[in-house]
Image (cartoon, grey):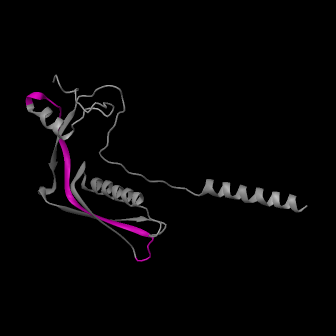
Amino acid sequence: MQKIVKSALSFVVFALTFVGSAMGQTQFDQAQARIIEPKQDVFIKPLVAEIEIMEKQQRQNYGPYEYPIKSVETLTFDELENIKKLALHQATVEAKGDIIVAATFRAYSDEKGKHVIVEISGFPGKYVNFRTARKEDGDYEWITTVYPYADRINTTGKTKALENQ
């Protein structure tokens, strides 16, 4: 009889644990900026754009933006980085821009340790004058200096994609 009760109790505990973990997370929020990876096995000609600083070319302040957390003690570095990305996204939308150049962050918790507050300072900018990179404009010189490899699959360490451009 005890064996049956223990088995039944073990099953109930297992079932409650499974149901509890399935119902635990009800929301999700993630942000990512300035990373475009088509992940195709073709070469894509580089696209070049300029950044035009908005707002009279003066540093602007954004925030504070507040994000709930479980506690300061359990906050991980990755969670804090994602919160900063979310705040950067909010600041970019607020500025009606494409990017915040030279963004600096101040992140701190509220007194109860249940929220992270982020303040951002930077130069709001828009991408303008999009064009395909051209050798005549000197684009390939700086592209191969800044990005010394053309694709991430090339293991030779040599850039051949731009040789004949």
Q: Residue at x 11, y 28 (%)?
A: 135
Q: Is residue 115 left or right of residue 99?
A: right
Above/below status of 8 relative to 46: below
**For residue 163, what is the image quadrant?**
top left
Residue that sits furthest to the front in the current view: 156
Let me know if residue 97 appears in the view: no
Magenta range is 111-136
Q: Residue at x 48, y 53 (%)?
A: 28
Residue 105 at x, y = what percent? 27, 63
Quadrant in which the N terminus appears: bottom right
Q: Is residue 28 left or right of residue 133?
A: right
Question: Is 113 covered by the magenta stretch?
Answer: yes
Task: Please name whichever residue, 45 or 62, is drawn nearer the observer in this view of the structure.
Answer: 45
Q: Is residue 59 left or right of residue 152?
A: left
Residue that sits furthest to the right in the current view: 1
Q: Residue at x 49, y 66 (%)?
A: 70
Residue 147 at x, y = what percent? 21, 38
Residue 123 at x, y = what percent? 18, 56
Quadrant in which the C terminus appears: top left
Question: Is 21 covered by the magenta stretch?
Answer: no
Above/below status of 38 relative to 105: above
Above/below status of 37 relative to 7: above
Above/below status of 127 relative to 120: above
